[in-house]
Image (cartoon, rainbow, N blue to C red):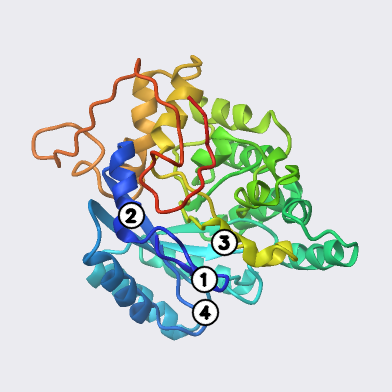
Amino acid sequence: MQLPFMGTVAADDFYAGTRAALAGGTTMILDFVIPSKGESLLAAYDKWRAWADEKVCCDYSFHVAVTWWSETVGKEMEVLCKEKGVNSFKLFMAYKDVFMVNDEEMYHAFCKIKELEALAQVHAENGDIIAEKSKEMSELGITGPEGHEMCRPEEVEGEATNRAIVLANQINCPLYVVHVMSRSAADVISAARRKGCVVFGEPIAAGLGVDGTHYWHKCWRHAAAFVMGPPLRPDTSTPEYLMDMLANGDLQLTGTDNCTFNGDQKAMGKDDFRRIPNGVNGVEDRLSVIWEKGVFTGKMDACRFVSVTSTTAAKIFNMYPQKGVVAVGSDADLVIWDGDATRIISSKTHHHVRRLNNYLNNQ
């Protein structure tokens, strides 16, 4: 929520975003503090807290991103864990020269995270390859939203996922791969878990609910609305494949990576896909999408639905049993869910500030 990114700020602030979350049945969010390179992690944390505290409608907590490395960063991570309650840190393998860290920096961060008994998270894409292929797309005259997916082929996500797992496994650091968007990345995670690696895979509502054919839509604004990183995959079987893996336990839980931008913000990249702010909605529609695509289709039962949308996250991020279970002494974050009810998803009725919805007209 409220993320400053790519020359603008996400449309949903902490009020609108948490309002949308509650409307969709999510009673707590975990957002990201993302410092700029060279910025103090503690200063960034305090800044995000100030933005959130006066606006949030529901319980929330933070992961903190490590976008650069030094001994000072390691010391600040320790303070965040011991004094601020942070227990997860995210590293970007993409967004070169902005958020991306190299393998050496990532290894040092993993070592510190292991020492703190925290959880490492990664945005898994090969940022160097993306940077080069983006230039190639531009030189070929490919400037539309389709170029975003074309410079980020599926194997680029799969390679980075494998590399992150290998690095984390050298020091037995638990790893959480955010927004798993492709068959390749999902297969890498599944295979690593079978070998005994401690790694968790998180598909998101967008990847489970829609596909990447939208990037080739004749309406530029429509296509740009789906630009996110990693991108949705044009293989139309991918959402069902990811849902199958979520249902059978090869992937463990769901998120949204909710980061919304309006059409005029997306239009910053009308002449160059590299300037389109990356992000889609999802926090309001996550439960509906997973119920429709998972439970209604018979891929998972209601108990698995609760696990992948609530309980598993509470356990992984050390909030269980305060969160994630209905029990004496636990928080009374109760959602009454009517599995037989129907609704049409629409930007006219959703609670986001964004005037677009990536699941438009889904029932």
The furthest residue to the left? 328
Residue behind mark 2: 16
Q: What residue is disc 4 on?
A: 69
Type of amino acid at the residue the image marks with label 2: Ala
Q: Which mark is residue 8?
A: 1
Give the number of the mark in front: 3 or 1.
Answer: 3
Crowd class of label 1 (few under 14; some 14 to 19; many from 20; radius 10 Å): some
* Pair 1/4: label in front: 1
Q: Sequence-wise, which precedes: disc 4 or disc 3? A: 4
Residue shown at 28%/65% (left/top)? 52
Q: Which residue is mark 3?
A: 264
Mark number, residue 56: none
Provide residue 337's location: percent of width, then percent of height. 28, 25
User: Can the viewer see residue 219 in this picture?
Assistant: yes
Q: Nearer the viewer, residue 100 or 296?
A: 296
The reply to whether callout 4 and callout 2 are in contact (CB within 8 Å) is: no
Structural distance between the alpha carbons of marks 4 and 2: 33 Å
